[in-house]
Image (cartoon, rainbow, N blue to C red):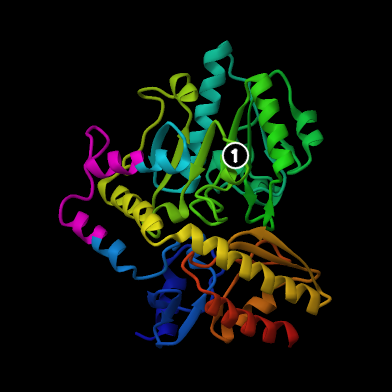
Amino acid sequence: MNMKEYIDEAERDLLHTYNRYQIVWDKGDGVHLYDLDGREYLDFVSGIAVFALGYNNKAYNDALKAQIDKVIHTSNYYYNVPAIEAARKIKKISGMDRVFFTNSGAEAIEGAIKAARKYAYLKDGTTDHEIIAMNHSFHGRTMGALSVTGNPHYREAFEPLIGNIRFAELNDFESVKKQVTDKTCAIIFETVQGEGGIYPATEEFMSKVKALCEEKDILLILDEIQCGMGRTGYMYAWQRYGIKPDIMTSAKALGCGVPVGAFMMTEKVAQHSLTSGDHGTTYGGNPLACAAVSKVIDLFEEEHILDNVKEVGEYLAGKLDELVLKYDFVKERRGLGLMQGLACDKPVADIINKALDKGLLLINAGTHVIRFIPALTISKENVDEMIEILDACLSE
């Protein structure tokens, strides 16, 4: 079958919840993807910030193949070595105390919300506690995650959601303070807003929110699903400022392609929240997914990934800044490390489509922002190639 035949079959069989580009992928290698016709594309999407190590990393592949030959799944009625080793390594890189493995980022958010509500319930025995989330945020499309997602467009068709959610503005501490009541049990936000347009939380905002949380025994939940796992030059973006959450979520690059997520918490929260029977998962923490997590963390250290992100991220930022100066309709660059956005005064879909035609993969973050989230192994030469193509698209 050729690409068109596969696409036609997909359109007949798959539920239409995505507006897909007219491409069928065959394979990937390094920072490139190849379609069924053999055409090569430079990838600055990396599976939406998933393939941090690039495609076809031999050490990663070999680790998964070895685990497949041993055991893939057993259930959480039993212990398994990969989960134990992965949890130990996550604790080391995150500074958190307890780990719960999920199958996705949205599931991790669900668990974080449940932990916060149980923590508050054990304090006063009531069930009307509130959570403060941020406008323009995105935390997932399951019901709990959708409830704290600050975009009415995503929420309106699925109301009523879980309720007792208030919204404030990222980097506006006073707006957060105005939403706090005696019932506030948690404040949740992305350390760098992704889908909302690439907006990093400022150190001042984070420090003030953290102080407020400590004063009132409110739990700070940081969503590091997209911005975590090295993307900003730190294993987790909050580590840039040393402002530690009570609960945090991780996914995407945590497994580099294998479906896996996690929510982590401090010992204080762990001892006063979820207990046996409160939360569970059939597949979460399975040996295959956790073997992936364990190997990913090893390779981050062995391949000096954070050093590359800091060096190439700074280089990418500089090149994008040049485009801001060159084109009047390109208004601003935002981001940290290898999570960058170019904000334009017009929709960017046409630019992304032109880039695709020229063999460059980009995606948006909202209608007016081009998002750059490549593999963390990307080189300056790859950046130069991308900029050359993008420059041509912007000038057309």
Q: Which residue is mark 1?
A: 242
Q: Residue at x 75, y 33 (%)?
A: 176
The answer to whether residue 91 is left or right of residue 386 is: left
Residue under the image location 24 percent in, 32 percent down? 77
Q: Is residue 395 left or right of residue 306?
A: right
Q: Residue furthest right?
A: 328
Q: Position of residue 6 (x, y in %)?
A: 40, 79
Q: In this image, 193 relative to 89: left or right? A: right
Is 285 drawn above or below residue 177 in the view shown?
Answer: below
Q: Nearer the viewer, residue 379 or 23?
A: 379
Q: Amino acid at mark 1?
A: Gly
Secondary structure at numbered mark 1: loop
User: Can see residue 285?
Assistant: yes
360 up-or-down from 108: above or below: below
The residue at the point 50 percent across, 64 percent down is 308
Q: For residue 73: magenta?
A: yes
Magenta highlight range: 63-88
